[in-house]
Amino acid sequence: MRAFLLFLFLLTNISLAQSRYGNEWIIPSQPYAKVSITENGIYRISYTELASAGFNVAAINPKQLQLFHHGRELAIEVVGEVDGRFDTTDFIEFYAEKNKGEQDSLVYYHSSRANPYQSLFSDETFYFLTVGQNSGKRILTYPAKLTNQAPEKYHLEEQLTVYTDQYSFNNSIGLVPSVQQSYFEEGEGWTGKYILPDTVAQFSLKFKNRVKTDELQPVLEFRVNGRSLNDHQLWYALNESTPLDTIVFGLFSPQDIAITLNEHAINNESVLLKTQTLKASNYDWYSMTYLKVVYPQSFPLNGQRSKYFRLRPNSLNQSVVQISDLSPDHIAYIITDRYNLAKVASQTTQLVVPNTAIQQRLFVSDEIKKANGISVVNFSVLNPTAYNYLIVTHKSLLESANQYAAYRSSVVGGGINRW
Ligand SMILES: [Ca+2]
């Protein structure tokens, strides 16, 4: 993967409001516990974990605990906060997601991310816990409720297969291009193994607990990525039938295809997708980046400890969800807005979910995860008016960045200061 050097010049302008920098969440006088996360799920941080990381637990007013991710405060639950003391049995609980690379979109200057489900660099992301000046944001809990409303018949399952076997540079395999842009080009990113023109690629999809309904048919979406220096012509077919269509896409470009699956396209709750190029050249190479099928599915967890549900909009603005194998240990969160999480209390195997006039996403899990690691961070004070520019670099390029900074601060370089 290409290391890159990005010089970011921050123009000194004292009239710039601080909100322009996006670092308002950092209060330099407050220590922060930096929490490493690499998987989606419900996390719990205990008194002991914070104390072992070196966080001053004696100074914690639990009501003022705040958690930040990507500079925004997330709602959390702090069990034991009511007495205003952080006791050894108190803990913090929240829903977190791994790094899905949303911020990678910044490096694609003329295009969008080739693989929207995989970070270019790492699954790891950091959540920051601190004791603020005021009350922190807390998870709202909707209590269990009795109702005669009929349960939802199904939710919309999103079954996703993401391929990350190879990293596609925007060049033919094995040939390093003479010029690479400093930004990421169309089609760059993680994708599947390249497929040769003689191969009929086969991708098998299996439905789980599908609900057959005339209201909604399953939709199969997939993204292929060009991998060689020619335009591609690709046919695709379902099962043993003749090709449905032929699509044309360029060089190293991604291409999306969506197919509505009729009932006769589904055999024994499976679908076989076949793809092949028309062999425009011997190097008519492409790869599969992801396959996604969205379909109506019934609610059982079937042994899965964690599961997402997408509820269809309900004009009653409330949905009843009956999960036959829901236990009292399961936690149900409405995660549609993951910064403003809400919890839904269950009544035996039933959840009454509010505000469903719009589609809501639920996360149900009985698995409490531990962070990979916690360390204490004290941020330095950065006074923008005291510096002229900022260098953002990679450690492999640090020496050159320092040389550049030394040059800029010299008389010849203009006597310009770097932070
Ligand atoms: Ca307490």
Image (tube, rainbow, N blue to C red):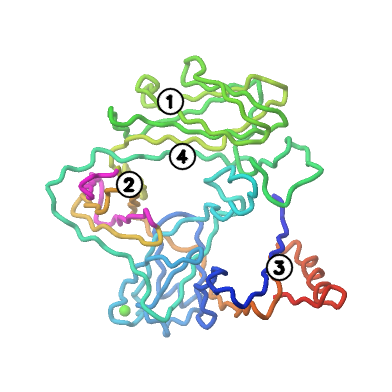
Residue at which label 1 appears: 271
Q: CA distance from mark 2 to mark 1?
A: 27 Å
- Residue 46 vertical placement versus 324 (above, below): below
Ligand 1 placement by image quarter: bottom left
Q: Is residue 402 magenta?
A: no
**Label ID, residue 281:** none
Q: Residue type at mark 2: give it.
A: Gln
Q: Residue type at mark 3: give it.
A: Ile
Q: Residue furthest right?
A: 412
Residue at which label 2 appears: 359
Left or right, 225 with respect to 264, comes to right
Residue at which label 3 appears: 391
Q: Helix or strand or loop: what does disc 3 sit on?
A: strand
Where in the figure is residue 322, as x and y percent of width and height? 22, 45
Q: Residue furthest left?
A: 148
Residue at which label 4 appears: 160
Can you tell which quarter of the image residue 339 is in?
A: bottom left
Q: Helix or strand or loop: what does disc 1 sit on?
A: strand
Q: Earlier in the sequence, mark 4 or mark 2?
A: 4
Q: Residue type at mark 1: give it.
A: Val
